[in-house]
Image (spheres, grey):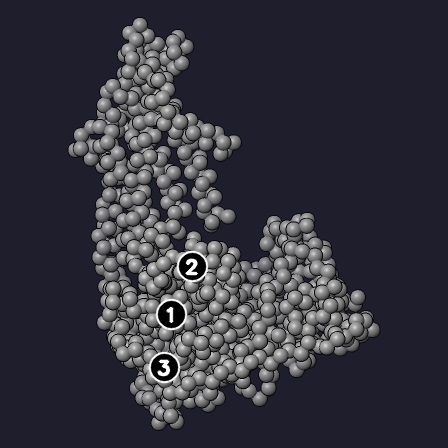
Amino acid sequence: MSECNHGSNNSRRMTDKLLTVRDLQVRFGEGEGAVRAVDGVSFAIDRGETLALLGESGCGKSMTALALLRLLPQPVGHIAGGQVLLEGQDLLALPEMRMRQVRGGRIAMIFQEPMTSLNPVMTVGRQIGEVLAAHKGLKGRAARARSVELLGLVGIPDAGRRVDEYPHQLSGGMKQRVMIAMALAGEPDLLIADEPTTALDVTIQAQVLELMRDIQRETGMAMLLITHDLGVVAGMADRVAVMYAGQLVEQASRADFFTEPRHPYSRKLFAALPDMDKRDRPLTVIPGTVPTLDQSFHACRFADRCASAWRTCHEVEPAWLEEADGRGVRCHLYDPAHPNPPAAGSEAEPDRLAARSAAPRDLLEVSRLKVHFPIHKGLFKRTVGHVYAVDDVDIHIPTGRTLALVGESGCGKTTVGKAILQLLRPTAGSVRFDGDELTRLRGEALRRRRREFQIIFQDPFSSMNPRMQVGDIIEEGMVAQGLVPDAGARRQRVEELLEQVGLRPEHARRYPHEFSGGQRQRICVARALAVEPRLIICDEPTSALDVSVQAQILNLLKRLQLELDLAYLFITHNISVVAYLADRVAVMYLGRIVEEGPVDRVLTDPQHPYTRALLSAVPRIDTDTGREVIRLEGDIPSPSNPPTGCHFHPRCPQAMERCRQAYPDRFERGSEHWARCWLLE
Amino acid sequence: MRVKLPAAILLLWAAAAVLAGALGLDPDRIRLELILAPPWEAGWLGYDDLGRPLLDRVIAGARTSFWVALWVVSLSAVAGTLIGSISGYLGGKVDRVVVHVIDIFLAFPGILLAIALAGILGPGIGNVVIALSLVGWVGFARLARAQVLSLKQREHVAAAIALGSRRRRIILRHLIPLLSAPLIVEATFGVASIVIAEAGLSFLGLGVQPPAASWGSMIRDGTRYLLVAPHMVLVPGLAMLLVVLAVNLLGDRLRDRMDVRLR
């Protein structure tokens, strides 16, 4: 089996190889029950090349990266076999002393969470200085000068001042830039970036990705980019390696991969992505779950979830099949040694969803909603100012329809949701639900009304009481509202709800920690449905989930909306989810809605410069080179001190004098589509 | 070793307390011929200044300290947890008042306050329980309040509010079960300090009244004969030392197991 990527006949390319990984094995634990987190992974990276390692959570991609640097969690994780050759030198055989020079010096790494990867009690300059001292022998004045230079290189404005600041004084995007500066300080040949932009907002993500591309072009550094986001892969990678259950299942150049993914798993990943064209049918889902890795496999690991699987797939482990151009796949479909399946299981086109009734009336009307949080300071806790989290927001949602509220973190979209539910009392404005003013309801009257509007949270881990059984969790609303007084009938209803969201009745007696993220989110949906609400506020319900699991939850929400005539307020930053699910979109910036309209109009013909920048910053899988990212400078301003005039003007590429002075009026662009921007006047 | 020995000591303590009535003890019988007799001359542990058997009296004292500790810890844990979690959950004016009350209680040295209270209430074991509970709830309240302040930000609490659950149910089902771990640790250490506090109050004559036995009063009686009959102090003193040490060792162990941050 030719595990190595390139044939030895291609000697020119051999010399270009920076890193070669051969048959890497990572185990957790010993003996029979050991988890084979990485099971025979081989790849190579050329100088100046970007290899994207793509896969869903738990497939072993981060473990692969940590194993390269010998940074596996001790003492359980260990490398059980294989080679990691950095220009011919086996890193796995190096003594720890020499390995320390490799880390940060020849191979640098940046992590997903810039918030926790920096030391909070050291200035940025000293943290970069540590790397410079260790790998470049720079100290004192020279180190400081180089730190400032590096910060400038990663696009931090006013680097001379920032170098003396502490991490908490920087925004998330700035921190990730500092991480990149630290990684660059040792002038590495290879940068390993583990989900470098996953924790960042989409406009900030665009800045950071562009920065990484620029630096790579200037320094000729190679990059191993670990990600779950096909859009990021499309924008960054030269080659793509797909990982599933501890193995590589496909490797190809970016162009080949995006025009024709070979492995059924890769194809499913594309199919599971939500977008506008798939609106009228359910998304493709991958049935089942990733197999546990504490077993030895004698068949294809994906066979149980694969629509094209036939007998051979369940009996013989597929070999790595390599083509001349470095393309490879681990699937029997492409193996001439095995007879092809009797009839390639053609995937049935999912049923189209039924059309919906027209012209419903408004269920929720929010007008001039304001939520201001006072800022207290000093000895006597005097109010010195306000955070204008939500400032003058109007929202209308008809029965059975979905409004998506889109914006970056800190724009106030979650606060809008909480204020509508009266989990936070609004400072001013009105929230009318089915004609009744919720802001005036108190105590028992409000409590009774709560069954009609529910919420699903982002984090399915903290949104359930870990000490309660699933059955009790789902039952809670029915008990609180006195809906089904008879305990036996209530149990039966819980079982029905579990089936309705795709779980099994016997799950009622288990605890939340026994479930996966997607299953937990289903339980949360069941809990909300138990009180038969008419409006559900979905606060980023899929952003903590993998693409294939996200597709399941989106399908569930869409099906339930049709069956039960539910209205959704869908709070999200994910534009493709909006395109798939929403009827109308409202775009929020710094506490205000800047544009609102029907989903097709806003996404295809955005009017506000912010909406345009936001849409252009979303990484997309169609690799058309004509698309240009509108790059927004700087970060979102603080909502406690919003800019004068239009809040967006300091970042707006088209700002005019007038934008600095007055907040724009609402300008209509066609029916039901408006934006707040002076350009439209 | 780290678990078995302390556990054995505590079991012995509890058994002595529960079974004291059934053992046919005679802590008040006076044998004038054995006054101040040391352990190596008569009885298992010798005799005190009135000729009473120290073994019987130490077991009777174990019973006193055990029940006082049990009552005080239960009362102050229940009261403190409820007050603390309600205050933390409601916030606002209620919380401000409770915090001030807690601060005032904490500003006094606990044992002085207990002495003052026991003095006002009058001597007697029931009053000792009341006095120590009035001081003891503060620690639980402060801990429970701090935990609730962070727990109430969790989304499962928001979900329960959104479902229309009543406050009582949220506090009892969604908050208190989740803060039990640190409270159990606090309660364990509470037992040790209550044993010492009870002995202290009894030493001062504010606890059990003669002729009933308590480790504290036994030590007080013994101090007058410290040079001629040191066993009168050593026997109850060692009993107390062993119990407090055992409780603290087990408490450490429990904290290590329950504190996820240390894992």
Mark toward the viewer: 2 or 1? 2
The residue type indicated by label 1 comes to Glu
The chain carrying label 3 is A
Cα–Cα span, label 3 and label 1: 17 Å
Give how far across and how far down residue A90 sits, in percent.
73, 59
Question: What residue sits 34% from the left and 30% below the top?
Answer: B66
The residue type indicated by label 3 comes to Pro
Please tell me if label 2 and label 1 are on a single chain: yes
Q: Tell me if I can see residue B210 in this picture.
A: yes
Horizontal side of residue A301 vs A468, given as left or right:
right
- In terms of depth relative to the viewer, which is nearer, A524 or B12? A524
Horizontal side of residue A386 vs A45, given as left or right:
left
The chain carrying label 2 is A
Cα–Cα span, label 2 and label 3: 32 Å
Q: Is residue A360 above or below residue A312?
A: below
Mark toward the viewer: 2 or 3? 2
The chain carrying label 1 is A
Question: What residue sits 63% from the left and 68% below the top?
Answer: A305
Question: What residue sits 61% from the left and 57% below the top?
Answer: A71
Please tell me if label 2 and label 3 are on a single chain: yes
Q: List the residue tagged with mark 2.
A: A491
Please tell me if label 3 and label 1 are on a single chain: yes
Question: What residue sits 37% from the left and 45% below the top?
Answer: B183
Q: Residue furthest left?
A: B120
Label number found at residue A398: 3
Q: Is residue A342 above or below residue A357?
A: above
Q: List the residue tagged with mark 1.
A: A532
Give how far across and how far down residue A126 sits, in percent.
49, 61
**Cβ atoms under marks 2 and 3 closer than 8 Å:** no
Q: Tell me if I can see residue A177 in this picture.
A: no
Where disc 1 sits, the SS reads loop
Q: Is residue B23 above or below residue A205?
A: above
